[in-house]
Image (cartoon, rainbow, N blue to C red):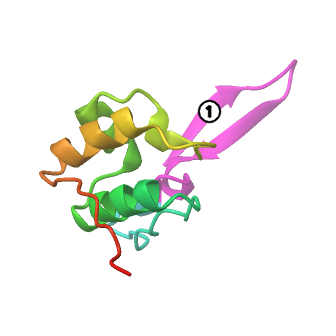
Amino acid sequence: MLRMGSGIGRHRFKIRLDRAPYSRLLRGWRRPRKPPKATGLMADDTVRARAFTHRLTLRDLADLSRTRGYFLRKPFRTNWKNIGKAVETLEGSMSIVWSTQ
């Protein structure tokens, strides 16, 4: 299927809709999901890995836990309030374990 479009000036170009980049998604080809990259902060990495196992994207996690864009970019420090919201969203709990010496 060809579609005509207007180019710059007098030139015209043709777009093949059956060869568009998104056409592979319509045919059922899907790439396997990649796990989130490690940030180096243990609490963030744990929450991101848990969201991945629940098949949530980091955008979904940010929207559901109402943390704005905290999980969409690499944090430079740990924000415990946002991590707590995400843990509650994922139906988990946070605890502190002290090592005995």
Packing grade of label 1 (10 A; few <14, some 14-19, many >=20) is few
Residue type at mark 1 is Met
Of residues 6 and 50, the one drawn nearer to the viewer in this rendering? 50
How far across and how far down the image is residue 59, in percent?
38, 41
Query: In the orientation shown, which residue stands out farthest toward the front?
Result: 101
How far across and how far down the image is residue 58, in percent?
39, 47
Residue at the spot 23% in from the left edge and 53% down from the top edge: 94
Which quadrant would residue 60 be assigned to in this image? top left
Query: In the orientation shown, which residue stands out farthest toward the bottom?
Result: 101
Do we see residue 28 in this rendering?
yes
Of residues 67 and 40, the one drawn nearer to the viewer in this rendering? 40
How far across and how far down the image is residue 15, in percent?
62, 43
Of residues 93 and 52, the one drawn nearer to the viewer in this rendering? 93
Q: Which residues are magenta?
A: 1-23
> Is 84 on the left or on the right of 36, as rendered?
left
Please tell me whether mark 1 sits on a helix, a strand or a loop: strand
Which quadrant would residue 37 be assigned to in this image? bottom right
Q: Is 19 included in the stretch rendered in magenta? A: yes
Residue at the spot 37% in from the left edge and 63% down from the top edge: 46
> Is 101 on the left or on the right of 90, as rendered?
right
Query: In the orientation shown, which residue stands out farthest toward the top?
Result: 9
Residue at the spot 30% in from the left edge and 32% down from the top edge: 63
Q: Is 99 included in the stretch rendered in magenta? A: no
Q: Is residue 92 above or below residue 32?
A: above
How far across and how far down the image is residue 62, in percent?
35, 36
Do we see residue 26 in this rendering?
no
Q: Is residue 79 above or below residue 25?
A: above
> Is 49 on the left or on the right of 78, as rendered?
left
Residue designated by label 1: 4
Look at the image and tell me in which quarter the C terminus lies: bottom left
Q: Is residue 69 above or below residue 41?
A: above
- Give the total number of marks visible in the rendering: 1
